[in-house]
Amino acid sequence: VGEPKAIYYWATHMVAWRDEQGELHVQDAFCPHLGAHLGHGGTVDGCEIVCPFHGWQFDAEGTNTAIPYSERLNRKARLTTYPTVERNGVVFVWYHPDGEAPMWEVPEFPEMNGDPEWSTVIRTEHTIDASVQEMAENAVDSAHFRFVHNTAEVPELEEYTTGFPEAVMRSSQKFPTPRGVMEGKIDTHAWGPGLSLVSFSGIVDTLNLAVTTPIEADRCIVRFNFRFKTMGDEKTTRNVGNAFVAEVDKQVREDKPIWEHK
């Protein structure tokens, strides 16, 4: 609260800040007066952000609310403001190249919101020199598991349904493990190109809320938010979870040269 942060996504410099009530705001970074970056030296005054250069103030909608050395406001001086929601332990910010309003809601998942049976959380992230489209397609590409990740065979596709904005893939596959091949399932439910909930079963019941944000046209950051169904105690669950996450990280490293050289 009260500390603006400079962020850079969508080839756009932005500032993220929380007001005194804890509400999050994300806006274009540069003051429309003379271009100072509000994320470098800017401050928060109540529910408004203050420019470090000349003290101009802007509210959560991007409207100029005060110029300390003038009795007049500048109605044309506005900050572009991006819709935000905080859900499932993640901050979501809506981006549309033409500035259109959000076209769907981010669903809430009970397992990500305090369910005691899914209390073990492990987070990872990967910066990848590829388009966000590559990540969206990979989430429902079952065939590559056999050839890139050395699964025992090509997964059996049980369902693949697409629509707007959702896509669903359900598959069964055999996982090679030190104890032999195990039967398992991977079910993926995606919303738009940047959000998917992936359910793994067979080795350890796992949910991965995978979120991908474009940094630039051919560079993105993928964040995985894993939750594991309790195996009786936190230490055992976390140890098994860490081993599972290590395998997923290995698979990302296997995918990365293909994504980055297409």
Image (cartoon, rainbow, N blue to C red):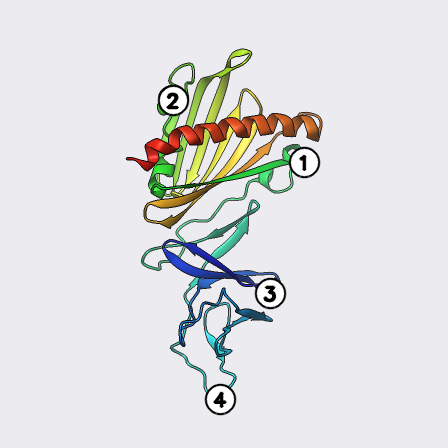
As drawn, 213 above or below 241: below
Query: Pointer 4: residues within 10 angstroms few (<14), some, or many (20+)?
Result: few
Identify the residue shown where x is 49% and y is 77%.
Answer: 56
The quadrant of the rendering that contains the C terminus is top left
SS at circle 2: strand
Q: Earlier in the sequence, mark 2 or mark 3?
A: 3
Query: Pointer 3: residues within 10 angstroms few (<14), some, or many (20+)?
Result: some
Mark 2 or mark 4, which is nearer to you?
Answer: 4
Amino acid type assigned to the residue bearing label 2 in the image: Leu
Residue wearing tag 1: 116
Identify the residue shown where x is 58% and y is 63%.
Answer: 3
Mark 3 or mark 1, which is nearer to you?
Answer: 3
Give the quarter of the image for residue 231.
top right
Q: Earlier in the sequence, mark 3 or mark 1?
A: 3
The quadrant of the rendering that contains the N terminus is bottom right
Residue wearing tag 2: 157
